[in-house]
Image (cartoon, rainbow, N blue to C red):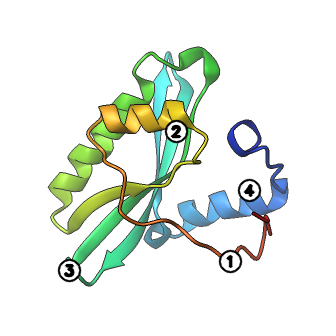
Amino acid sequence: MAREIEDIELDYNRLLAGTRAVFEDAGKGFFVVAERESRVVGQLMITFEWSDWRNGLFWWIQSVYVEPASRGQGVYSALHQWVIEQAAAAGDVCGIRLYVDKSNHNAQRTYRRLGMTPAVYDMYETDFVLKREE
């Protein structure tokens, strides 16, 4: 996903440890997968952000990936709908957020089609790991 969308090569050991950390600590988030014929064809991860303004949690959709052969077949839409239903039922979730690479226009169209709207915020970061420059 990082290579395809952002042309970034991730460190395998760091990625594996980061993925395992989510499975070992539910407070970090959880993964959702889509399967066809007992084979994973898509996935996303949910992480959490507390909002004092809303007294609730935002669920952040991250690490979205749908295998190329399954794109355009409703895989992400099904994952997204499941997240919306679970978040609405949780009782302490105030909204869903995600970030998307500015050049990923296909994903942006998908998110808008599913009822999401661009936020009023720009994202800034200091990245100690990937250390990308503008």
Q: Give the CA separation, mark 2 to mark 4.
A: 16 Å
Position in image of residue 121 (x %, y %):
41, 66
Label 1: few (<14), some (14–19) or many (≥20) C-alpha neighbours in 10 Å? few
Query: Looking at the picture, which amino acid does disc 4 mark?
Result: Leu
Q: Is residue 129 visible?
A: yes
Report the mark closest to the observer, 4 or 3: 3
Is 84 on the left-hand or right-hand side of 127? Answer: left
Label 4: few (<14), some (14–19) or many (≥20) C-alpha neighbours in 10 Å? few
Query: Looking at the picture, which amino acid does disc 1 mark?
Result: Thr
Q: Are marks 3 and 1 in contact (CB under 8 Å)?
A: no
Nearer to the camera, 114 or 41: 114
Label 2: few (<14), some (14–19) or many (≥20) C-alpha neighbours in 10 Å? some
Q: Are marks 2 and 4 in contact (CB under 8 Å)?
A: no
Quarter in which the N terminus is drawn? top right
Is 125 on the left-hand or right-hand side of 12? Answer: left
| Residue positioned 24% across, 54% down in the render | 87
Report the mark closest to the observer, 2 or 4: 2
| Residue where numbered disc 3 is placed | 55
Q: Quick one: label 3 or label 2, which is nearer the N terminus?
A: 2
Report the mark closest to the observer, 1 or 4: 1
**What element does badge 2 sit on?**
strand
| Residue positioned 20% across, 60% down in the render | 90
Q: Give the CA separation, mark 2 to mark 1.
A: 27 Å
Query: Looking at the picture, which amino acid does disc 3 mark?
Result: Asn
Query: Looking at the picture, which amino acid does disc 2 mark?
Result: Gln
Residue 126 tag number:
1
Q: Is residue 1 visible?
A: no
Q: Give the CA separation, mark 4 to mark 3.
A: 33 Å
